[in-house]
Amino acid sequence: MGYELSNDQVAEAVNWRRHLHENPELGFEEKETSAFIASKLSEWGYEVTGGYGKTGLVGTLKKGTSHQVIGIRADMDALPITEGTSAPYASKTPGVMHACGHDGHVASALAAAKALVDQDFDGTVKFIFQPAEENEGGARVMIEDGLFEDHDVHAVFGMHNWPALPVGTLVARADQMMAAFGTFEIIVKGKGAHGAMPHEGADPVVAASQLVTALQTISSRNVSPLLSAVVSVTQIHGGDAWNVIPEQVVLRGTTRWFDEEVGERIEKRVAEVAVSIAGALGCEAIVDYLVRYPATINDATQAEVVRTTAAQLPYLRVVDALPSMAAEDFAFMLRDKPGCYFWLGAARSKGENPGLHSSKYDFNDEVLPLAASFWISLVQSILKVADRDDR
Ligand code: NI
């Protein structure tokens, strides 16, 4: 039951993955990656359309007579991190590396795309290769560039390797998978003074310090304990001298939530708390708050399709897990189309198991055949060829 890649197919996919790993490109700059993908897809007979989010592209393969269309998304971008692995195929580009495994996501989608050319299915499969998943919202830009007007999929699917789970496991929740996220910058403006004469100024360091702790009351006192919310101040910048109270301090951080009302409440409270605390201490707060990605919420029916397909495969085991407070821009696709985003376990069984975004992280190649075979099985289970006897 289901598809399983041959050893030659796996070896080829591993080569692609390592080639991509060696040549990482940042968000919206995935030119070589995109050209590599486009040339393979064209060679295999896919219709390739580009121009979505600069480097994003779609490869389409149609078989049979069904009008059913599904989309499979793979992200292409790397991160601004200096690689700390000693892999022979380590990044050749200083300061840029595939630390989130998008090299593996692309390679497994390509392996599936190639194998599907020789497999039976009835309908249309569209492989969506997206730029800039990390922070810049490449999925949103692809959609703004007409992705779903040109490629009207009935359902869309996305996968992420998950080093916290063992290889061979799959998580596809029926609802929340990944959180929504916002970012904020708060400039606390005071009045500089000599450090020995604080009463002559308005100290933004003291105001910023109180603000950091006050912001923690948003999740603990403004949001129901039964809902999820995170407010993390991750940067504090201010002052240059031992004995000078600076003019201003800059705070930056990130917020996370699932429920939209919670998101609105966090945004409102960050501004209120900042302005009030700063004001009470004779300073002024200038708040710049940005809502970045919505929450990644699966469609229950499509999640069930993913779980049912996985449950039939001998090499995959469906497991339960809590959602993650990290964010994912596949959320934008799921806002427009029903679909499912799932995790494939990717823990290394031997030695260290560095997490996503670690400079020591390297996509676990054991996941490649599982991911590719799963994609093929998913296509064949949704775009099912009718029983020949029925025709
Ligand atoms: Ni990622």
Image: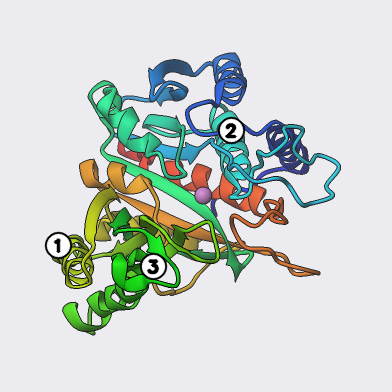
Relative image position of residue 368 (x, y in whole percent): 65, 48
Give the residue at x 32% y 76%: 210
The quarter of the displayed image where residue 33 is located: top right
Is residue 206 toward the left or the right of residue 18 in the image?
A: left
Mark 2–mark 1 CB contact (< 8 Å): no
Please tell me whether mark 2 sits on a helix, a strand or a loop.
Answer: helix
Dot 3: few (<14), some (14–19), or many (≥20) neighbours within 10 Å? Answer: many
Give the residue at x 37% y 46%: 329
Give the residue at x 27% y 21%: 150
Establish if 202 lies above or below 213. Answer: above
Q: Which comes sooner in the sequence, label 2 or label 3?
A: 2
Which circle marks residue 110 in the picture? 2
Which circle marks residue 348 in the picture? none
Give the residue at x 45% y 61%: 236
Q: Nearer the viewer, mark 2 or mark 3?
A: 3
- On the rendered image, what quadrant is the C terminus found in? top left
Q: Amino acid at mark 3?
A: Val
Q: Nearer the viewer, mark 3 or mark 1?
A: 3
Relative image position of residue 340 (x, y in whole percent): 35, 53
Is residue 113 toward the left or the right of residue 380 in the image?
A: right
Which circle marks residue 205 in the picture? 3
Mark 3–mark 1 CB contact (< 8 Å): no
Relative image position of residue 369 (x, y in whole percent): 65, 48
Dot 2: few (<14), some (14–19), or many (≥20) neighbours within 10 Å? Answer: many
- On the rendered image, what quadrant is the N terminus found in? bottom right
Who is closer to the viewer here, 17 or 201? 201
Is residue 264 toward the left or the right of residue 235 in the image?
A: left
Q: CA distance from mark 2 to mark 3?
A: 52 Å
Please tell me whether mark 3 sits on a helix, a strand or a loop.
Answer: helix
Q: Which residue is mark 1?
A: 268
